[in-house]
Amino acid sequence: MNSEHKNLLGKIKNHRGQGTAHTSNDSYILSGHLYYDVSVPIRRQIAKDWLRENKSISQKDFVAVLDSLYQGESHEEKTLASYLLGYSQSHRSNVKPEKLNQWLNHLVGWAEVDSLSQNIFTAEEILGNWPAWQNLLEKLSRDKNINKRRASLALLTGPTHRSNDKRLSDLSFKIIDSLKSEKEIIITKAISWLLREMSHQHKKSVSDYLKENEESLPKIAVRETWQKIKTGKK
């Protein structure tokens, strides 16, 4: 265990049992990993405090801490790694996309997967290294690990919501096409999520796609996306 990982784990344990009704719900965790029942706000504060105390940490050492945390036993260690990454733009910009593939090997269930995939990497960061990101996302969408397939959808939600770049929407539709026949809720809900977020910048394209694929898409995705388009509400 990395020495800073050990330090952070101690902080997690100091707050064990301080979760919320939401974060203590097994339907939220769905990982089977050890759970200390520490709330998300507390975990996020631990991440912010640690980054403030370690401003001069090198890229190599920062990634080593994340490598160690993602391989930790508990849900809190794994999600804390993602919070550290999300709060450190300077280090995040130097992380190669393929590194996410390695970290995803240790994440199970939507809460852990989404901690790394949701609103961490920006459209600018992804488009700035497009060939590598496109390769990663397509690779994840074909992986036998369902958690990685979910990540291929979740990683595009924030960027497509904030950018009208056609490369993002085209890839999103391609990945949705490859996964829309799956029945597991971890995938069907992610398809719905991505389509709804895409409708903010790509409303016409999403509407046309729904009309053309209504029979083959998960029913929940069709229903929730049309509601979003028509009402603007989730």
Image: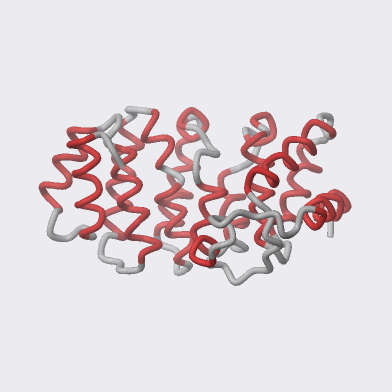
Q: Residue furthest bottom?
A: 32
Residue 105: quadrant of the picture: bottom right
Q: Position of residue 71 (x, y in %)?
A: 71, 62
In the figure, 12 relative to 89: above or below?
A: below
Q: Which residue is at a point 36% across and 37% down the rendered structure image?
A: 168
| In the depicted structure, whether residue 48 falls above or below residue 171 | above
| Residue 125 rendering spot, x and y as whole percentages | 52, 31
Q: Which residue is drawn at 48% across and 28% down?
A: 124
Residue 163 or residue 200, whichever sits in front: 200
State left or right for residue 160 relative to residue 36: left
Q: Quadrant of residue 120?
A: top right
Location of residue 129 in the rendering, given as x and y in whole percent from the top left corner: 51, 34
- The reply to whether residue 31 is visible in this rendering is yes
Disc count in the image?
Answer: 0
Q: Which of 19 and 234 is in front in this view?
A: 19
User: Which residue is found at the position 43% from the left and 52% from the top?
Assistant: 152
- Using residue 179 as the reference point, say whether residue 151 is left or right of it: right
| Left or right, residue 12 beside residue 190 | right
Name the quadrant of the N terminus: bottom right
Using the image, determine if residue 176 lies above or below residue 94. Answer: below
Residue that lies at the very extreme toward the front in this rendered image: 21
